[in-house]
Image: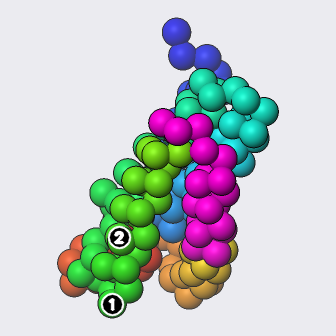
Amino acid sequence: MIDARSRYVTDAVSTVGPARLLTMLYDRLLLDLDRGCSALVMGDRLTGASHLQHAQDIVAELMSSLDERVWDGGEQLMAIYRYLFTTLVDAGVQGDSEKVAECRDMVEPLRAAWHAAAQAVSVSAPQTTAATDAHGAGLLGVG
């Protein structure tokens, strides 16, 4: 049976726009990286691997939602996502907290940039409609 918290989270995620969802994914990705790194440092590889698996799932979602054709930086961002995914897999298998910290160092500025972009979009775009480009992607290249 689904508990009330799970239902609330599911409902919250399903009703947000693409910009907010993207920032939520980045926030959770950082949380998973922090938790995974802490667990690995403390010698708890099972818990660390579990958090890193969730982080990999988030990176996979980011990869699948990125339309590289929307903007010039799309290919470079996809390359970063591929690197993150591969490095997180290696870190989980090897129990390497340093690789997780390296990934975190890459994710933090991306998270800040997406939060700034989402804020700019929310200020400039009407709240009742989702602005899309010719490819049908949202303003942040996802959608």
Specify whether residue 123 is painted magenta. Answer: no
Query: Percent position (x, y) of residue 90?
Result: 46, 46
Foreground of the two, 119 or 85: 85
Q: Earlier in the sequence, mark 2 or mark 1?
A: 1
- The reply to whether discs 2 and 1 touch (Cβ–Cβ < 8 Å) is no
Q: Is residue 70 left or right of residue 85?
A: left
Query: Percent position (x, y) of residue 2?
Result: 54, 16
Q: Secondary structure at mark 1?
A: loop
Residue visible at 46% across and 59% down in the picture: 84
Residue visible at 36% across and 62% down in the picture: 82
Specify whether residue 106 is painted magenta. Answer: yes
Distance Cα–Cα, label 2 vs label 1 = 11 Å
Other-residue count near label 2 (Cα within 10 Å), few / some / many at <14 / 14–19 / ≥20: some
Q: Which mark is residue 78?
A: 2
Image position of 104 with respect to 128: above or below: above
Query: Can the viewer see residue 130?
Result: no
Residue extending furthest toward the top: 1
Residue visible at 55% across and 54% down in the picture: 25
Residue matched to label 1: 72
Magenta stretch mostly in which secondary structure? helix
Foreground of the two, 41 or 54: 41
Q: Is residue 97 left or right of residue 69?
A: right
Q: Which mark is residue 42?
A: none
Q: Amino acid at mark 1?
A: Asp
Task: Tell me the magenta residue range.
Answer: 92-111
Q: Amino acid at mark 2?
A: Met
- Name the quadrant of the C terminus: bottom left
Residue visible at 66% across and 40% down in the picture: 36
Foreground of the two, 4 or 126: 4
Query: Can the viewer see residue 1?
Result: yes
